Amino acid sequence: MGSLGTNPTSFSAFPDDKAAFEPLNPEDVRAYLHKAVDFISDYYTNVESMPVLPNVKPGYLQDELTASPPTYSAPFDVTMKELRTSVVPGMTHWASPNFFAFFPSTNSAAAIAGDLIASAMNTVGFTWQASPAATEMEVLALDWLAQLLHLPTTFMNRTSTGRGTGGGVILGTTSEAMLVTLVAARDAALRRSGSVGVSDIPRLAVYAADQTHSTFFKACRLAGFDPANIRSIPTGPETNYGLDPAKLLEVMQADADAGLVPTYVCATVGTTSSNAVDPVGAVADVAAMFNAWVHVDAAYAGSACICPEFRHHLDGVERVDSISMSPHKWLLTCLDCTCLYVRDAHRLSDSLETNPEYLKNDATDSGEVTDLKDMQVGVGRRFRGLKLWMVMRTYGTAKLQEHIRSDVAMAKMFEDSVRADDRFEVVVPRNFALVCFRIKASGAMTEEDADEVNRLLMENLNKTGKAYLAHTVVGDRFVLRFAVGSSLQEERHVRSAWDLIKKTTSSIMD
């Protein structure tokens, strides 16, 4: 290393440290971002050939990079080199077309550009006045998306007759959407029950199917609900693991008869485990008997509902109180971007509003603007609306629908292949672009044996680095999930994955 190695404290070895520190020097911004963009472009070109899952051990990065921060500056090229040599090999490549685990984390050139520009502007749009365009853009993007989903105008910020009573906000994740609506529902129920303060919280009850995402039950605890009053309603194959409205009514009525206050029901369109769909309209009808808040979690499958052939899954949405969906899952908009719509924005802001003196301003006092800080947990917020708007503005509805339909068609192709091989079974009917399948028990193989064989199949597949699948448990059986939708995926990747599955299965069973 020459003088760099023998005299690390010498300023002569670090000429840049003599100059004035200018972290936003325009020429540095241009040079660094050009290199970053080249890296990104090269990454997307080459990610297909990289192992989807890395072969690293916990703590590897601290061993490769220094455990303590550097005292002196280094050329940006050094930073980029360490990114390539140390960070990239430890990444699970969600962008890989060979990634079939969990749900997709989609992206696009327009979204990346929007996120980059938003990061550069670095606005903190807690109030309209703090950044009018950031608030206006978020409102516009949300209303555009609401129109793509054919949501009732009651969920829109602006309608043809002016400002609506409903509205939306872009949050980080579905967890946040659940938490803020749970808090609003909690406060509304306490007011209805005549509670003094929060003294009646132990009487409030909340409901969801057992297939509902685990984040719901976490959010309930954070919102202060008694865990004893969080109802997880069993589902089964008779409803394709969707929530049975009759069972929901039975449980809510029993709680009401016992002196509890049914407060909130979460219905899901496209559960994480198996893509089950709860009947939104029927659930809303049951909840209305008890004046309970209904929230629809459409984090993944909501994106599909921009296509007319899938929109029926949201039938009855006009009778719910809130709905959330995440374009970062399936609508080509990078993390984080969860869109929450509420039918009455004031019910949300009444629970979440903050109004310190230093944030007071004429625009807020006029009542003509939306201060998005009052629809979320925190105050500060990113300019998330820009990337969502850029995706819709750049690609248009037709291209976005084409993207959804292509993924669904590839998933159907995979499903047909599974059904054609008598070693396998499709465990639940395919909804959208997720196929739940497994090696079926046959001959002397028991269901328990089949569970272990399927677990081994998944492990062996993932070890190859050529595909990545995750699993779930449906009806007490170990099931593999094959989720189509990575932005770079083509039919050939799905076919290659199926060939690998067949080959690996033969090596296990022969």
Image: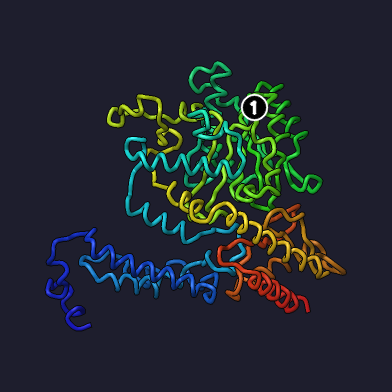
Rendered location of residue 465, percent (x, y): 58, 74
Rendered location of residue 334, percent (x, y): 48, 56
User: Label 1: which residue?
Assistant: 262
x 49%, y 75%: residue = 46
193 lies left or right of 411: left
Q: Residue furthest right?
A: 443
Q: Which quadrant, please, contains the C terminus?
A: bottom right
Q: Which quadrant, please, contains the N terminus?
A: bottom left
Which one is nearer the viewer's eye here, 84 or 310? 310
Rendered location of residue 375, percent (x, y): 45, 35
Looking at the rendered structure, the kind of residue marked 1 is Pro
x 47%, y 67%: residue = 91
Q: Residue furthest front?
A: 160
284 lies left or right of 450: left
Above or below 41: residue 477: above
Above or below 17: residue 298: above
x 52%, y 32%: residue = 159
